[in-house]
Amino acid sequence: EPSPVKKAAIKNSIPVYEPQRLKDPGFLEELKRLTPDFIAVAAYGKILPEEILKMPPGGCINLHASLLPEYRGAAPVNRAVINGEAETGVSTMLMDKGLDTGPVFLEERVNIPDNDTAGDLSKRLSVLGAPLLVKTIELVSSGKIRPTPQDDSHASYAPPLKKEDGRINWNKTAGEIRNLIRGVYPWPGAYTHWKGIIIKIHSA
């Protein structure tokens, strides 16, 4: 299923490149030919090679769905809900060789309502994040902003979810189980086994 970005690009006759490997020589040459001022990255599951990071004069700017340095990694929204956080947000950062370790330009905070699922929160963060990314690029372009290094002593990691992460551990408290159910919805979904049957739980 094409992403909304790809659909919009195709509709407006904008070329779309989807390399299997970011270090593919043909793709790198095409990227150089385009001479990008910036490269914007959002919800992209690969670390950019140094050759790409150094390519645009404005740098590679990433939109990340947490208040960095908290919840670096692939599943920041899910992990925040699973851990029962009351607040999260979106951050824009100048990418470096690490995993979400680059200095931060801007951030916007948002409360996590007690009934929010990861799916609900993701939608709200995307609405916040898009204009924040545009604002960041405008400020960087005009030289009106410099990124602030992250405090690594407060860093935490949000590893990718696996199917088995949705399995309920009934030794946890009721609150922890409810947060798990919210945090793994819509994927991978919470489940348990009863008399040989898999039962999926969507809300609690």
Image (cartoon, rainbow, N blue to C red):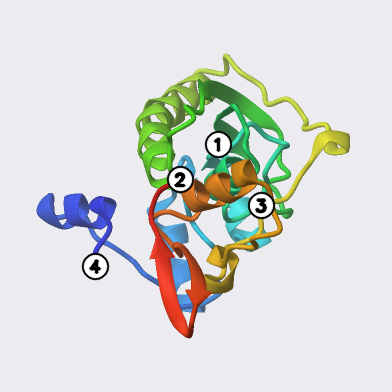
Q: Amino acid at mark 3?
A: Ala
Q: Amino acid at mark 2?
A: Ala
Choose between 164 and 62: the one closer to the eye: 164
Query: Residues at badges 3 and 1 in contact (C-beta under 8 Å)?
Result: no
Res. 158 mark: 3
- Label 3 or label 2, whichever comes before in sequence order: 2
Secondary structure state at the residue bearing disc 4: loop
**Label 4 belongs to which residue?**
1
Mark 2 Cα within 10 Å, few/some/many (few <14, many 20+)? Answer: many
Res. 58 mark: 1
Question: What is the count of numbered marks?
Answer: 4
Mark 3 Cα within 10 Å, few/some/many (few <14, many 20+)? Answer: some
Choose between 43 and 6: the one closer to the eye: 43
Q: Amino acid at mark 4?
A: Glu
- Check the image and report above or below for 90 versus 108: below
**Label 2 belongs to which residue?**
118
**For the residues marked 3 and 2, what is the alpha-carbon distance in whole angstroms?**
13 Å
Q: Amino acid at mark 1?
A: Gly
